[in-house]
Image (cartoon, helix red, strand yellow):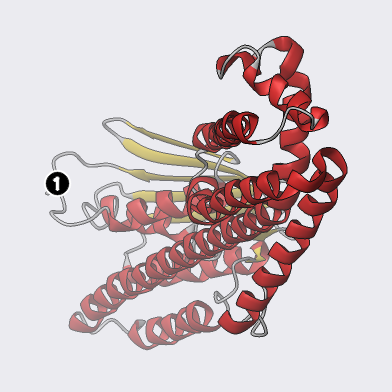
Amino acid sequence: MWGNWYTPNIRIVVHLLFWVAVTLLYYLSYERLVGEYYWIFMMKDLFVTSTLFYLASWLLPKWVLKGKILLSLIGIIFSFLWWVGCTYIICKIGSDLIPTSEYKIHAYFHIFLEDGFWGAFSLKNLSDIILDFLFLISLPLSPKLTKVIFEDAHKLTILERDKANLERDNLQMELDTLKSQISPHFVFNTLNSIYRMAEKQDPNTSDSILNLSNLLKYILYQTKDDLIYIAHEVQFLKDFLNLMKLRYPENVKIEIETEHTDEPYQIVPLILIPFIENAIKHGPDRSRKDAWVKVSIKIDNGILKYLVSNSVNNLAEQHKNGGLGLQNIKRRLEIYYHGHYVLDIKHDDKSYSVLLEIKL
């Protein structure tokens, strides 16, 4: 905070000038009050102040930075007791050495010595003693306390900023990882489909490859931003389903209905496709007997309503691997739309459906 100019040598000079100023303050105060014996109290307060000053330099940063308020309060109480204790000892010694004719200084001794050490804390004496403490001790210590508080507040601000930046970077890293998992997952499933078409020498194989190329362009170049226009995402879903229609015979029904999706709403890219992938995987991929997939997308008063349902054949063999896409999508929904989405999954013996509502 202090810049490069505050070198160790400069710091020594600053401290020396500071203590010269404090000494002058004590001299002017005590010379007026106690006359020629001012040096006794001046040396006492210099000793007390210097010990507290450097003790505070060592302890307060640790306490303030760690939020130890109670220890800080105990430190202030200890400072007061330390000053009173040292003053009491000096008064005890001075009352025996200084002639009683110096009535002004003996009047000061009387405040501390009349009722013993603890008598200094009585109500009749406490107000005067606290005022002396605040003037003679707190004033010289206040620059140090101010410096410590501001330095540690600055350190806390930096720590909070670094923590927030770290959390942001970790979150971005997690999101990038989730995105990188979505694309290979999607490409793997689609290439599998085209491979099966090529094995059967399906004449639609070349169209499927071209369609896949367009889809990959979308994934690689149009999904880098956190949000894209929902119309682009809907078109991507349509292209994907058209690719799936080439793969299956006509008796497998794949339908998509869209309504009011031309408004300039934005959505997180690739957040809808995993539900269709799962519908294909657990519907027509698992059994083509009476297989169907239905997709409905509409926007009503700024709320996206996305319904994906598919047929279920419980007699067909279940997939051993899977669930990665759905796990990722749930995580991304929680990150991007926490508190602003509803995910409802239902299934029975004949169908499986997912209803997702997102406040855009």
Q: Secondary structure at mark 1?
A: loop
- For the point 27% across and 42% down, the residue is 312
Going 38% across and 69% down the picture, which residue do you hit? Answer: 177
Give left or right: position of 318 versus 55: left
142 vs 90, nearest the viewer: 90
Name above or below for residue 264 compared with residue 137. below
- Answer left or right for 53 relative to 254: right
Please state the horizontal and vertical placement of residue 168, each as a whole percent of the image. Answer: 52, 62
Q: Residue 351 location, x and y as percent?
A: 34, 37
- Whether residue 300 is visible to the viewer of this picture, yes or no, is no
Find residue 132 and report its image quarter.
Answer: top right
Q: Is residue 195 visible?
A: yes
User: Callout 1 environment at 10 Å: few (<14), some (14 to 19), or many (20+)?
Assistant: some
- As displayed, is residue 68 above or below residue 150? above
- Foreground of the two, 174 or 8: 8
Q: Quadrant of the N terminus?
A: bottom right
Q: Position of residue 41 (x, y in %)?
A: 68, 44
Q: Is residue 321 left or right of residue 263?
A: left
Q: Please name the residue shown 57% across and 16% down the image.
A: 118
Which residue extends farthest right? 32
Image: 231 above or below 126? below
Q: Residue 234 in the image: x percent, y percent?
A: 59, 63
Measuring 41% from the left and 51% from the top, which residue is drawn there? 331
Q: Which residue is mark 1?
A: 316
